[in-house]
Amino acid sequence: MTHRAASLSLALLLGAAFGLSTWLQPRALDWRGQRAQAGSLLEVLLGDGRRMFANHFFTKADVYLHSGYYPSLFDQAKMNCEGQRAGTAHDAESGAAHTTPAHDEDAHDFLGKPTDWLDAFGRKFRITEHTHLETNGAEREILPWLKLSAELDPQQVETYTVAAYWLRAKLGKVPEAEEFLREGLRANPDSPEILFELGCLLDENRKDATRARNVWQRALRKWQKTEAAKAEPDKFLLDRILTSLARLEEREGNVAKAIEYSIQLKTVSPHPEVIEKQIEELRGSPRQAATNAPAPPR
Amino acid sequence: MNTSFALARVVIQELYRRKDFYVLFVLTAVITVVLGSANVFNDDKIVRYLKEICLLLIWVSSLVIAITTTARQIPAERESRTIFPLLAKPVTRGHVIAGKALGCWLATGLALVVFYVFFALVTCLREGQWPIAQYFQALWLQWMMLAVVVGMATLGSVVFSATSSNATICFVVVVGILLVGGHLNTVAMQQPEPASSLLYTLYFAIPHLEFYDVRDLVIHNQKLIGGLDCLLATLYAAVYTAFFLVAAWLVFRRKPLSA
Amino acid sequence: MDAILRTENLRVEFRARERGGAPKLALKNLNLSVRAGEIFGFLGPNGAGKTTTMNVLLGFVTPRSGNAFLFGVNVREPIARQRIGYLPELTYYYKFLTAEELLRFYARVFGIPPAETERRIDRLLKLVELDPARKQLIKTYSKGMQQRAGLAQALINNPDLLILDEPTSGLDPLGRMKVREIIQRLKDDGKTVFFSSHELGEVETVCDRVGIINQGELIAEGRVADLTREHHANLEQVFLKLIGYQPQAVA
């Protein structure tokens, strides 16, 4: 190939590549949806790999909560294998031993017995005791990882709700929790989970029933908008929203509203008979009787 | 013995006259200080994340120092021809191997002391506690691990002609053992034969460097490791180090050198 | 007088560079001896085997057969090198050390006590005229200064035998003269010097005996005066004649 032909070919290729990238770019943004609007430097540098790091740091927070006692990938694989074998064994036996306390304890003891002398010796240099951070505000140690995880993947709503829970419920940092939740809402305006957690904060920490009610009602509307149409909607979240609304209305004396929410709750609760019993109690309560009683003559 | 110590002294002089150590230390210090000044929900008592990141940087830096310093010792002596006036003295090749390895190990030990003093100052001032015994134990165990790494790199330096090959292979092997070495038995149990037997053989043959990685114990304020266990770990490291150094001597003594 | 440097039927082979090639015979049954107190010049064209002989004497290379002895001790024993000093042709020393530190290091290797070490360092640095530069790093030295530092390290243990490989290579005339003076002074002190050189005029002036090696074989050995008288020529002409040099006819 002559020099001129090679140059022309190269120019043609560059032109084609440029044209293709220009044509693809707006379509790529549509494919990726909301997450395509990369903002911070970390997001730009790490690209989609940031979600992997975000998940890693979210798990790291859990590791810290357990003071470092946490199964590695290999331990988890081993547990899965043993679980499958145990499941096969249980299926073969017709009894059930799934819910014994011993079985629950086993789930936490992922290390099991040492397989050889090296394994036994190696355990002397590892954390082998299952504990939780739960004294003197030690839970604060999980916060940096949650913050970093949220920074890397603002669309992972669980990060915000978990962090906010620990901040407000265990560390007494209510303003920080609220600010973090609002930050999460800015990144995820349609998130019923974050709205629900914000409602909990307003109700339990700020003692502001009116605002809590408004936020929970908004959460309910967002749930209906985002989850209701799904093949497997998040019924657990709906359960929690309706339960919180029902309890709030009951506490505020709005029994009718409480009953209304309880009736909705009955349709998604795993224990409808319990909810039915609560509804009956609400109907029979003095406040409800007062509501139902005719007005005294003038 | 005098000869080996004299050689070791020269290695230490070289380390603190080169820039590598200072660059790594400054990098560790800057990253730690920047992270330490980050505002995490207006809480200035949070310290474990700082410990984790600082210890990670210390581990990476100490491995870089140990492997790169050791990997270049004997090849540099041969390339720069400084080995000839050295071997023209009543110095055996065994002295050279022992002296270089000892020097690299002592040099990394000195570097570790500096790193750990900085680490202790930063974290203890923040935490309000001074678990010096625990930090010393972590330093000691890490130093023992580095003895094995130095031995490995010394053997590599007489086997491989290029320093970069040796350093790369050492890094890959060390990081591999740290990440996966302790789990080879778990993986082996899940494999069919003959892979299972091969993995088990490998599991028992490799030096288990992950024993010496007690960062989690330091980060999460766990109790000290027993004295006997520490001693056994020290002996374990000494055995592997001796094995690598003897192997290096056996290879090196047969190599022809032409002035 | 007993030889303090002696080789017996020394044979050295090197593997061929190309695969399947025959090994190269670097030394063929070399028999050499150097007596105490003499200056011995070891001459030969490039590739003759001079450096290989020195490498064997210093233990860098193992011979295929034969033996070499220093002070009656086989060169395979490290103790054989306790009383020698060696100056290589290409002088490279630890660039991150100063001349003072370099000499201190080698003194430690010999086990010389610290007080004696400091005395020797002062004396040697003055002898090789490196005293003003003693605290500068070797990497800042010129070639001549490095050569002189090399000479100082070769003398740190007050050796009875000095092995010098082309000691004046790369030096200016002043430097070469200083080296010759040092060699003469060493001889006056009763030391033995064994050196290789291409400067035949220098060798003729300084040496008591010479050995001429060509293609791995010692082709002549004896007193300089005896060789020049026997061949009725100067040392250079004797050398060229013995190695079989034929002058090219001018067209």
Image (tube, coloured by chain):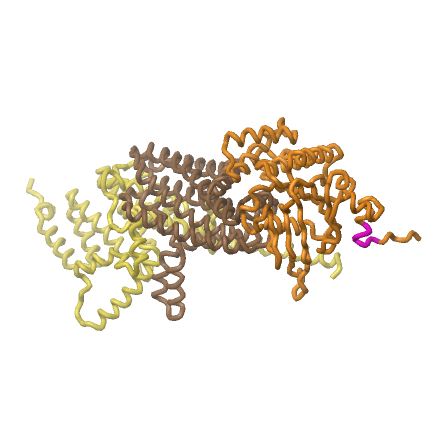
Is B219 covered by the magenta stretch? no
Front residue (pair B58, B220): B58
Please give left or right for residue A133 compared with residue C194 in the image. Answer: left
Q: Is residue A192 visible?
A: no
Rendering coords of residue C98 (x, y %): 58, 33
| Up-down relation of residue C25 to residue C173 (above or below) | below
| Chain letter matching colour brown | B
Q: Quadrant of residue A17?
A: bottom right
Front residue (pair A244, C47): C47
| Up-down relation of residue A102 to residue C165 (above or below) | below
Rendering coords of residue C65 (x, y %): 61, 59
Residues rendered magenta in the picture? C240-245
Front residue (pair A108, C120): C120
Residue extending farthest right: C251
Residue extending farthest left: A297
The residue at 59%/36% (across/down) is C158
Rendering coords of residue C131 (x, y %): 62, 27
| Up-down relation of residue B35 to residue A260 (above or below) | above
Is C241 covered by the magenta stretch? yes
Residue extending farthest top: C132
Report how many numbered discs are placed on residues in the image. 0
The residue at 31%/57% (across/down) is A119
Q: Is residue A268 visible?
A: yes
Please give left or right for residue B37 compared with residue A278 in the image. Answer: right
Please give left or right for residue C79 compared with residue C29 in the image. Answer: left
| Chain letter matching colour yellow | A
Front residue (pair A140, B193): B193
Rendering coords of residue A239 (x, y %): 23, 54
Colour given to chain C in the rendered image = orange
Please give left or right for residue A101 compared with residue C181 in the image. Answer: left
Q: Quadrant of residue A1?
A: bottom right
